[in-house]
Image: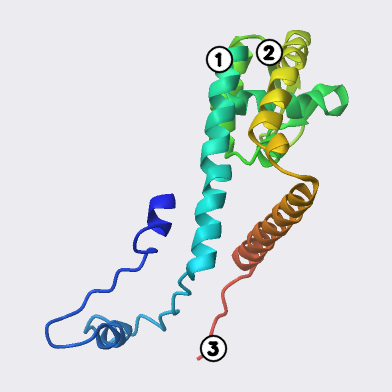
Amino acid sequence: MASTAGGTNGRSRRRTSNGSASETTASAEKGSGSGKSTGPVTETRWLNHDERAAWLANSAIMISLPAALDARMQREAQMTFFEYMVLSVLSEQPAHTLQMSDLAARTAASLSRLSHVVGRLEKRELLTRARIPGSGRRTNATLTESGYETVVAAAPGHVAAVRAYLMDALGPQELATLRRIGAAVDAAIKREQLDAGSAASTPPETSTP
């Protein structure tokens, strides 16, 4: 991801021997010769110098920070960072229980990935799963007593890592800015997810002869 943003800034325009890049793009918009239009091509909004620098700097938060937290968690608590997050989210719920679909949303994971990790934690007796009575295939995940003790024991090391890698490296104003940035990015992602969900639920228009 970072390498795409660097170097060429993701820009790659193929020139032909007898035409410019714009002419090639215009030809592509007309279709492949089958008589069918491929539709308008949206112009790419390339990153300017400042935007590119900001993107590359924040790649460290998105890529390097989770990797560092994961390595430290495995070294100190013998679990992955994602496993810790699953146990941590459950520890904050009433009765230490949460439906799997909600747990996936809280940990920003797909159900398939979550199921795999939960199965691993279940074998270690750190949590249990139980079907929810009624229609549909709904399942609850519940933190066991051993799981709660495990996450409580791992929490101080996790907080120390967060402080060392992020909090203590920033001043009060930088932390306030980081909080606003995180909220803005989260809101943008949720808007797109909401729009995508609305589009998926809208039936296609049908034309009448």
| Residue located beneath label 2 in the image | 126
User: Could you tell me which residue is drawn at 21 percent across and 84 percent down?
Assistant: 33
Compare residues 120 and 202 and report the one nearer the observer. Answer: 120
Q: Is residue 121 left or right of residue 34?
A: right
User: Could you tell me which residue is drawn at 61 percent across and 63 percent down?
Assistant: 196
| Residue located beneath label 3 in the image | 208
Q: Is residue 200 left or right of residue 17?
A: right
User: Could you tell me which residue is drawn at 66 percent across and 9 percent down?
Assistant: 125
Compare residues 138 and 104 and report the one nearer the observer. Answer: 104
Q: Give the CA distance from mark 1 to mark 3.
A: 65 Å
Residue 139 spot, x, y in % from top left: 70, 29
In primary-sequence order, the first of circles 1 and 3 is 1
In the picture as drawn, the residue positioned furthest to the right comes out as 94
Give the amino acid at mark 3.
Thr
| Residue located beneath label 1 in the image | 75
Above or below 64: residue 15: below
In primary-sequence order, the first of circles 1 and 2 is 1
Residue 167 spot, x, y in % from top left: 72, 37
Q: Which image quarter: residue 169? A: top right
Local secondary structure at mark 1? helix
